[in-house]
Image: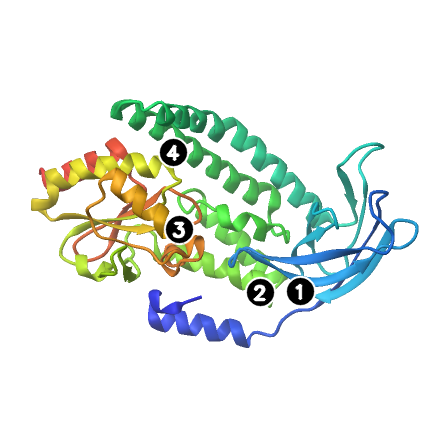
């Protein structure tokens, strides 16, 4: 993590504290029998790092002659993927002493039956609920928005459908917070929910869950991760001073959030693949024409990994306001500093750099600017 984009003293303190904490090792085992496995092949157990969005090899397990496998591991509790030679993966949440067994769910079934890990049971329940919530709240309005976009619908239609998609996703995240607080509680699976936490819904209760988790697992890497996410939520809450971020535009010019002190600035995170973001880009043009003379500005952070995609989308949307990107996507230090786990996301900052609103879109943003500039 590049800490220069976070408040300097706090970032260094957090970084060194994390490095100096003793790690907590645990013993857990993985075994099973799957007819689809060829004797002599190996299964990989990979540790999931949600912050870096990657996996590291925890160990390999040899498949025996009777299609069985078994191994014991010593390492921190956490999230894992058991990856078969076919590429199929079984998601696991493992705590100390758990002995997970993986077998075929039913005869002639491609699914898996997992026993011996209560944390994995909770993880499976969360994933099932998350997929159901997406199907109910997000996919229908998103499909309508994408269809309208492909058909070249007018601006008013796109704005209306975009608002529906954004609200559907917001409702989805609220449901996930509810499930995390009420069902996941202090399970190891709580870490799996952390990338989708909503800072604007029951955040105090969620913080209490993290505090309780910390008491149960004080020295885990995933404990530090969730505590840091909570710290960043506080740094991006209403009333907080926005963290300083800087970078270069597509033509290499440097820009910094500090450049906008003295103005009311919308800090907007976007990407070419985010249709609601693209709709807002066209909306920003009109707001800038109306309020630039009053001190309103837009400063954008693009989260595309492709500079070409960023450039093409910017040109098509008529983006003329300052924007930066390091082509690191979700791993961008700017995205980390503002806890960006989903798009669209924006912050409205006053002339002193203080956050006065979050995620205002469309008519809500227009109404807020009218309130500020047309008193």
Residue at numbered disc 4: 166
Which comes sooner in the sequence, label 1 or label 4? 1
3D distance between C-alphas at marks 2 and 1: 8 Å
Looking at the picture, how far across and down is residue 190, in whole percent?
58, 50
Query: Mark 1 — residue?
Result: 76
The residue drawn where x is 43% and y is 26% is 141
Helix, strand or loop status at disc 4: helix
How many marks are shown on the rendered structure? 4
Q: Is residue 114 left or right of residue 188?
A: right
Task: From the top left corner, tell me how far across and down residue 250 is, in percent.
Answer: 28, 55
* Closer to the camera in the image, 160 or 313: 313
| Image side of residue 300 versus residue 259, left or right | right
User: Which of 59 and 102 lies nearest the eye of the viewer?
Assistant: 59
Measure the alpha-carbon separation of dots 4 and 2.
33 Å
Residue carrying label 2: 221
Q: Is residue 161 above or below residue 73?
A: above
Q: CA distance from mark 2 to mark 3?
A: 31 Å
Residue 373: give x, y in percent of width and height: 11, 41
Question: Which of the marked residues, 3 or 4, is nearer the chain's N terminus?
Answer: 4
Read off the residue under disc 3.
306
Q: Nearer the viewer, mark 4 or mark 2?
A: 4
Q: Tell me the quarter of the image containing the C terminus.
A: top left
Contact flag, marks 2 and 1 (Cβ < 8 Å)? yes
State which mark lies toward you, 3 or 4.
3
Q: Answer with mark 4 or mark 2, whichever residue precedes in sequence.
A: 4
């Amino acid at each position: 993590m590049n800490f220069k984009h976070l408040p300097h003293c706090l970032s260094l303190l957090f970084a060194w504290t994390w490095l100096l904490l003793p790690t907590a090792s645990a013993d857990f085992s993985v075994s099973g029998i799957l007819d689809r496995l060829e004797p002599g092949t190996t299964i990989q157990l990979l540790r999931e790092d949600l912050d870096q969005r990657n996996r590291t090899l925890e160990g390999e397990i040899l498949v025996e002659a009777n299609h069985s496998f078994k191994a014991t591991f010593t390492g921190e509790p956490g999230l894992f993927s058991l990856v078969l030679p076919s590429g199929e993966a079984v998601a696991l949440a493992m705590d100390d002493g758990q002995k997970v067994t993986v077998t075929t769910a039913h005869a002639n079934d491609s699914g898996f039956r997992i026993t011996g890990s209560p944390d994995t049971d909770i993880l499976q329940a969360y994933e099932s609920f998350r997929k159901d919530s997406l199907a109910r709240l997000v996919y229908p309005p998103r499909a309508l928005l994408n269809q309208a976009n492909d058909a070249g619908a007018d601006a008013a239609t796109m704005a209306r459908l975009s608002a529906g998609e954004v609200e559907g996703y917001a409702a989805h995240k609220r449901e996930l917070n509810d499930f995390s607080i009420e069902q996941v509680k202090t399970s190891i699976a709580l870490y799996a929910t952390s990338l989708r936490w909503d800072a604007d819904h029951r955040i105090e209760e969620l913080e209490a869950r993290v505090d309780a988790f910390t008491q149960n697992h004080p020295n885990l890497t995933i404990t530090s991760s969730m505590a840091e996410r909570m710290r960043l939520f506080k740094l991006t809450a209403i009333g907080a001073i926005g963290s300083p971020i800087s970078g270069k535009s597509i033509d290499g010019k440097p820009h910094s959030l500090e450049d906008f002190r003295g103005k009311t600035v919308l800090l907007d995170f976007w990407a070419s693949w985010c249709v609601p973001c693209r709709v807002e880009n066209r909306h920003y043009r009109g707001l800038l024409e109306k309020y630039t003379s009053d001190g309103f500005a837009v400063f954008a952070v693009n989260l595309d990994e492709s500079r070409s995609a960023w450039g093409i989308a910017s040109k098509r949307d008529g983006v003329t306001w300052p924007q930066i990107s390091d082509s690191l996507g979700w791993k961008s230090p700017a995205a980390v500093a503002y806890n960006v786990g989903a798009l669209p996301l924006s912050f409205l900052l006053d002339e002193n750099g203080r956050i006065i609103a979050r995620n205002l879109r469309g008519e809500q943003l227009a109404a807020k600017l009218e309130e500020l500039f047309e008193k």
